Image (tube, grey):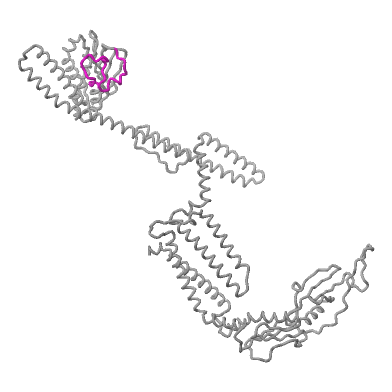
């Protein structure tokens, strides 16, 4: 079946069969309707034949009467018809009937054709014979009385002030009937309708028509009888033809619809040039073509000429409609039925233009135009209230009800946008603003808010990814360096155990030992800093007494502080201050901070180490005076490899504060660094247990 869809010969055969089936269905349907109107399904064949003969022969009988009136001679146009013409008195004027056996007869009365002038109160009204009522056909023959002498028509006197009337004329208030028969030119004047009816009866011809039983096999009446016999014998068959041809036509029509747009060796729907015409324009063209093809049918033709006009016109109308249906099917399959219409394109263009104008117009001007339109409409309603108060008030109420609905919608939309922005501002990056039922600027704003969230998420993700890659790089490189460095340290240790041969060798070994130890410490700090920043270090939070830890720190660094000429001032409360922290990491934080103090504090100054409680939190503060000027921001000191010693002539790698900051975050604590001139201050804040 799919191969037939793309076969052009199959489609052509289907179209030809459909045309034949349409002609058969239409012809059979017309025949069935006529047979039903002629009572062929209820009457006998004799009754049906008489009806057909009468319908055809009566016109021939009337034609015989009109021909005799006009020419004075009898003539019958059909060899199977006999006629007798009688005058108003019943005398036979002409006949060709010789008492043959007949199957049908009729009597027709042919009244004269005349002009009638009805005169009343000296005012005449003109009628022709068709407008004047004709006496009943079954009136009795009346012998007409001699018609009076017609009244002469008065000639106007141009010299007299008043028109003169001949003495023989009827007085002005009398009534008379003036009749003139076509062809004779004679006028007859009657004073009553009865006189005129008698004259008409005298001039009326009576024509009797007879159809012979033994017909000659030619002529219109014989053809009519033959057609009646054929139709009567096929009266039930035409019903079957109508049903079967209709069913077969529907099946072929469905096949053509299914095959529309298919081409040979192609599974896709391929439109033709007709299918590319806008559908509404194509529909108008098809409708115009159908109207043009119907004009010859409506003009009217005689039988059998009508067949040579009716059949081609019906075929052309059917083919045009079939073309429209096939194009409709192709457009439906392609989904271009409505999108290809000119009116739809125009409406979409209007909509896009209006939407584009509204989108590009600033929101302030949109509200100004909206308020101006509302004021103008309100003014119109108020002006109409003068002539139609009730109607204007009703529409005014509807208008402001609509305005209230628009305002309420704007308020609800703004509330949705505000709540969505508030969620995003609070850090809930997974929150979205629902764009459903939002229009114009509200929808654009919701779209922008959602994209802000997406942009922030993407930026944060990229930054975290970059930080993670950098940390992993440092960790991997540190591990790669640590392995050969361990070998260097070990071999330096072995060489030191051997007796150096010269002092230079001893000096070189001391330098190697010092620098390798420094490099080892740097690598260990790098690894620890990377683990702390990525959260890879394990944390075991336990209650810790900060007072005891500070005493241990002071004792551990007493000798080094004294060597650096620094005086430690320890301030702490008498009662223990306990926090949740990991002792190992907490000691590393204190150790890094005290190392920085020993390295960078100004000799001969005091170092303050203070423990206090504030707002339910424990705070540990380290303060010292820097030896070098701190020309940088406090936050920069927590970055990796950043040192307060810009000249970098002292020991250190700039990782101590960064490690301390990350370790504080792992323990749910906070670390704050502040600079006030040369005063360096670090505050550690822990939540109390």
Q: In which quarter of the image is the N terminus?
A: bottom left
Tell me where the magenta segment starts and ends, as one range: 629-657
Q: Residue furthest left?
A: 499
Instruction: Specify whether residue 165 is painted magenta.
Output: no
Residue 128 x, y percent position in the rendering: 77, 72
Q: Seen in the image, is 256 located left or right of residue 343?
A: left
Q: Seen in the image, is 477 located left or right of residue 311?
A: left
Residue 183 x, y percent position in the rendering: 79, 76
Q: Count the marks.
A: 0
Q: In terms of depth relative to the viewer, which is nearer, 567 or 138?
A: 138
Residue depicted at 44% across the width and 62% down the height = 257
Q: Seen in the image, is 134 located left or right of residue 472?
A: right
Q: In terms of depth relative to the viewer, which is nearer, 525 or 539?
A: 525
Residue 384 x, y percent position in the rendering: 64, 44
Overall secondary structure of the magenta section? loop
The answer to which quarter of the image holds residue 416 is top left
Residue depicted at 40% across the width and 41% down the height = 434
Residue 300 x, y percent position in the rendering: 63, 70
The answer to which quarter of the image holds residue 643 is top left
Q: In terms of depth relative to the viewer, which is nearer, 120 or 279?
A: 279
């Amino acid at each position: 079946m799919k191969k037939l869809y793309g076969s052009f010969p199959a489609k052509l055969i289907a179209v030809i069969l459909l045309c034949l089936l349409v002609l058969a269905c239409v012809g059979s349907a017309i025949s069935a309707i006529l047979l039903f109107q002629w009572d062929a399904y209820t009457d006998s064949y004799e009754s049906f034949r008489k009806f057909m003969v009468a319908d055809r022969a009566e016109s021939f009988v009337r034609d015989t009467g009109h021909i005799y009136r006009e020419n004075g001679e009898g003539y019958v146009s059909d060899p199977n018809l006999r006629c007798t013409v009688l005058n108003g008195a019943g005398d036979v004027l002409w006949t060709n009937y010789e008492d043959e056996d007949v199957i049908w007869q009729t009597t027709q009365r042919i009244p004269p054709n005349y002009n009638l002038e009805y005169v009343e109160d000296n005012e005449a009204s003109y009628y022709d014979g068709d407008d004047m009522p004709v006496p009943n056909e079954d009136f009795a023959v009346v012998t007409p009385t001699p018609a009076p002498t017609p009244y002469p028509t008065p000639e106007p006197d141009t010299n007299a002030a008043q028109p003169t009337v001949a003495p023989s004329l009827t007085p002005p208030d009398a009534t008379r009937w003036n009749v003139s028969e076509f062809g004779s030119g004679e006028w007859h004047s009657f004073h009553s309708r009865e006189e005129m009816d008698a004259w008409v009866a005298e001039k009326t011809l009576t024509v009797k028509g007879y159809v012979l039983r033994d017909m000659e096999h030619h002529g219109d009446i014989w053809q009519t009888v033959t057609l009646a016999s054929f139709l009567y014998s096929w009266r039930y068959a035409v019903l079957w033809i109508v049903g079967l041809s209709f069913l077969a036509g529907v099946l072929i029509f469905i096949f053509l619809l299914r095959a529309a747009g298919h081409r040979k060796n192609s599974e896709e729907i391929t439109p033709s040039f007709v299918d590319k015409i806008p559908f509404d324009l194509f529909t108008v063209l098809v409708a115009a073509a159908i109207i043009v093809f119907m004009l010859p049918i409506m003009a009217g033709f005689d039988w059998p000429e009508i067949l040579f006009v009716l059949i081609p016109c019906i075929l052309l109308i059917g083919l045009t409609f079939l073309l429209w249906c096939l194009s409709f099917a192709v457009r439906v399959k392609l989904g271009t039925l409505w999108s290809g219409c000119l009116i739809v394109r125009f409406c979409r263009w209007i909509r896009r233009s209006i939407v584009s104008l509204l989108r590009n117009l600033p929101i302030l001007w949109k509200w100004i135009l909206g308020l101006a339109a509302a004021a103008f409409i309100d003014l119109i309603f108020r002006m109409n209230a003068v002539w139609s108060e009730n109607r204007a008030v009703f529409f005014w109420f509807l208008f402001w009800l609509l305005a209230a609905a628009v305002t309420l919608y704007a308020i609800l939309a703004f509330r949705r946008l505000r709540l969505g922005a508030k969620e995003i501002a609070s850090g809930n990056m997974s929150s979205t603003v629902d764009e459903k039922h939002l229009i114009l600027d509200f929808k654009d704003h919701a779209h922008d808010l959602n994209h802000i969230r997406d942009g922030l998420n993407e930026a944060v993700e990229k930054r975290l990814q970059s930080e993670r890659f950098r940390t992993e790089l440092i960790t991997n490189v540190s591990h790669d360096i640590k392995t050969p460095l361990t070998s260097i340290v070990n071999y330096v240790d072995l060489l030191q155990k051997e007796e150096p041969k010269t002092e230079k060798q001893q000096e070189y070994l001391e330098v190697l030992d010092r620098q390798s130890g420094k490099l080892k410490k740097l690598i260990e700090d790098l690894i620890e800093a990377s683990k702390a920043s990525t959260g890879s270090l394990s944390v075991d939070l336990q209650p810790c007494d900060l007072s005891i830890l500070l005493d241990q720190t002071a004792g551990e660094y007493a000798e080094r502080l004294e060597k650096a000429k620094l005086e430690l001032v320890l301030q702490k409360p008498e009662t223990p201050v306990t926090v949740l922290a990991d002792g190992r990491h907490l000691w590393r934080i204190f150790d890094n901070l005290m190392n920085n103090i020993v390295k960078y504090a100004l000799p001969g100054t005091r170092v303050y180490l203070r423990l206090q409680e504030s707002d339910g939190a424990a705070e540990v503060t380290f303060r010292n005076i820097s030896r070098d000027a701190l020309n940088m921001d406090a936050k920069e000191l927590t970055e990796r490899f950043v040192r307060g010693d810009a000249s970098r002539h002292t020991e250190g790698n700039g990782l101590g504060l960064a490690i301390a900051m990350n370790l504080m975050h792992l323990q749910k604590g906070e670390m704050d660094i502040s600079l006030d001139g040369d005063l360096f201050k670090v505050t550690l804040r822990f939540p109390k247990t």
